[in-house]
Image (cartoon, coloured by chain):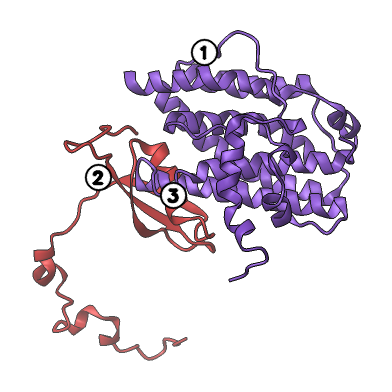
Chain colours: A red, B purple
Amino acid sequence: MTAKPTDDVGQWPLWEVFTQPPGGKPHEHAGSVHAPDAEIALQNARDVYTRRGEAVSLWVVQSTAIVASAPGDDGPFFDPGNDKPYRHPQFYKTPRGVKVF
Amino acid sequence: MTSPPLFELLLRLGDDRLVLGHRNSEWCGHGPILEEDIALTNVSLDLIGQAQLFLDLAGAVEGKGRDADALAYWRDETGFRNLQLVELPPGDFAFTMLRQFLFSAWSHGYLAGLTEAENEDLAGIAAKAAKENRYHLRHAAEWVIRLGDGTEESHGRVEAALAELWPWTAEFFHVDRVDEALAKSCHLPSVETQRADFEKIVNEVFGRARLTAPEGPGRMAGGRRGRHTEHLGHMLAEMQIVARSHPGATW
């Protein structure tokens, strides 16, 4: 993967860093680094975010490749639907004859 | 010079890393970008950590009560056994990265041999150093490739650094009584093997970096016998001043 070496103000592209903690847990967002290409992004992420044994695996992805929801979406987009109790499993009674663990 | 060969070898291993670590650490706060500043400082800390282990073991082998601090801060220039390559001032980023690459490329095969040493402490320290060196080599090699195969300016800078640094690499392959005495017990690779390992790594990276190793004779360098360039004394003055001004100070 290659990136445009620098942006309009001479800054290297931004990469988002995801680290995987030991024990098979999922990758988590750790932060970001600047780097001219993927290999250097990986090395910079290693130096900035994994030097104290926090990770067993690293992902880097160019920040521009991430599609994000907008802050203004918080109401309609993430409405938890607490007024719609049937969305939660607790709404349903366990039928007789089903063993509850 | 009549000190035991193992003591001399441990001083060489420790001093190379102490001096190069100090030279790289001069970039701390001056790196071209924040991430590289951190990376270079990490490499410095690895090297100084290795130096501490090698020099502590040197002190133990010597048996006169000197530890790594005593050896690092209370020897004068002529007592240091590092290669002259590592004492040169850091120069620009291309010079620093290329020097780290050349040193790591040579260390790769040399440390691999030492991990088989009969002395288990030495073998253990060499294994740790070899592991860290693999990352230093990868990091420095990637930068040499990008500088060499980059812009006109970056290529010119790394080419100039190569012209200056290359003759000093001859000292990697200088064999003396210490190497001969320890070749078997410390499992030191032969000069031919060292050179072949070094050239294999260098040729592959230089090919991708559009660089050509210069022809011509290497420098006659005497770092292993305590003969140094004018630069080491200045570096040691700065490195040792606090320890010597306040002997035994703790905090």
Q: Position of residue B167 (x, y in %)?
A: 61, 18
Q: Nearer the viewer, residue B222 or A5?
A: B222
| Residue at x-position 54% and y-position 41% | B23
Q: Amino acid at mark 1?
A: Thr
Q: Is residue B135 visible?
A: no
* Label 1 vs label 2, nearer the camera: 1
Dividing the picture into quadrants, the one containing residue A64 is top left
Residue named by callout 2: A65
Q: Are marks 1 and 2 in contact (CB under 8 Å)?
A: no
| Residue at x-position 74% and y-position 36% | B112
Estimate the spatial distance between the alpha carbons at disc 1 and disc 2, rounded to whole Å: 38 Å
Residue named by callout 1: B212
Q: Position of residue B226 (x, y in %)?
A: 74, 34
Q: Nearer the viewer, residue B210 or B170?
A: B170
Q: Secondary structure at mark 2?
A: helix
* Label 3 vs label 2, nearer the camera: 3
User: Would you call the spot at circle 1 few (<14 residues within 10 Å), some (14-19), or many (20 or more)?
Assistant: few
Q: Are marks 1 and 3 in contact (CB under 8 Å)?
A: no
Q: Secondary structure at mark 3?
A: helix
Q: Secondary structure at mark 1?
A: loop
User: Would you call the spot at circle 3 few (<14 residues within 10 Å), some (14-19), or many (20 or more)?
Assistant: some
Residue named by callout 3: B38
User: Would you call the spot at circle 2 few (<14 residues within 10 Å), some (14-19), or many (20 or more)?
Assistant: few
Label 1 chain ID: B
Residue B109: mark in rendering: none
Estimate the spatial distance between the alpha carbons at disc 1 and disc 3, rounded to whole Å: 30 Å
Dividing the picture into quadrants, the one containing residue B132 is top right
Q: Amino acid at mark 3?
A: Ile
Q: Nearer the viewer, residue B29 or A50?
A: B29
Label 2 chain ID: A
Label 3 chain ID: B
**B233 with respect to B144 (left or right):** right
